[in-house]
Image (cartoon, helix red, strand yellow):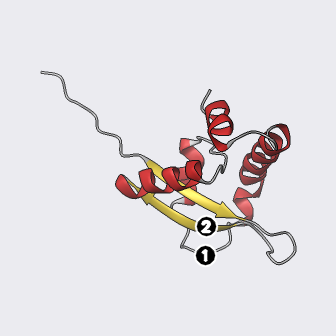
Amino acid sequence: MLEEKYIKQKAVALQYDKEKDNAPHVTAQGSGETAKNIIKIAEKNGIPIKKDEDLVNMLSQIELNQEIPVELYKAVSEVFSFIYGISNNTENKEPEEVNEKNNQ
């Protein structure tokens, strides 16, 4: 008999404003349907999505509106670098084109 493994989807949204924030902070997080809604909202608004299961698991442990801990700066900076790179390459494209490129 095969045992099926069910993995619940997770999502975490971060925000960072270099003018007023000391570090990025968690603005939304959830699993299952909540994660799907976070992803849907990001896609609808043309916000790039980076899949990183390990990082999402770590960020899921941070309270909403809390800054990320120093230990995660390097990992999160790589995500922001990825996002800024996509943003610079897709400034004039429609949101659907951006998200299609992100999911490749």
The residue under the point 51% across, 50% down is 39
Question: In the rendered structure, are the residues bearing label 1 and label 2 in contact, judged by CB atoms less than 8 Å apart?
Answer: yes
Q: Residue 103, relative to residue 55: is it above or below?
A: above
- Residue under label 1, please give it: 65
Q: Can the viewer see residue 61?
A: no
Q: In this view, does 40 lie above or below 104?
A: below
The image position of residue 20, as x and y in percent, is 83, 78
Please state, as top left, top right, bottom left or bottom right, where the C terminus lies in the image: top right
75 vs 9, left or right, is right
Residue 72 picture quarter: bottom right
Image quadrant occupied by the N terminus: top left
**Cα gap from disc 1 to disc 2, whole angstroms:** 5 Å
Q: Where residue 100 sits in the image (x, y, percent)?
A: 62, 32
- Residue drawn at (76%, 51%), measured in percent from left and top? 80
Q: In this view, does 9 lie above or below 19?
A: above
Q: At which x and y percent is residue 92? A: 81, 41
* Label 1 residue SS: loop
| Residue 87 badge | none
User: What amino acid is at disc 2?
Assistant: Val
Query: Going from the N terminus, do you reach mark 1 or mark 2 first?
Result: 2
Q: Please tell me which residue lies in front, 50 or 23.
A: 50
* The furthest residue to the top: 1
Can residue 69 be seen in the rendering of this structure?
yes
Q: Quadrant of residue 85?
A: top right
Left or right of 90? Residue 53 is left
What residue is shown at x 35% (from left), y 41% (from top)? Answer: 7
Residue 90, how many percent across, how many down? Answer: 79, 39
Mark 2 is surrounded, within 10 Å at the Cα level, by few (under 14), some (14 to 19) or many (20 or more) other residues, namely many
Q: What residue type is labelled 1?
A: Asn
Q: Is mark 2 on a helix, strand or loop?
A: strand
The residue tagged 2 is 26
Q: How many discs mark residues in the rendered view?
A: 2
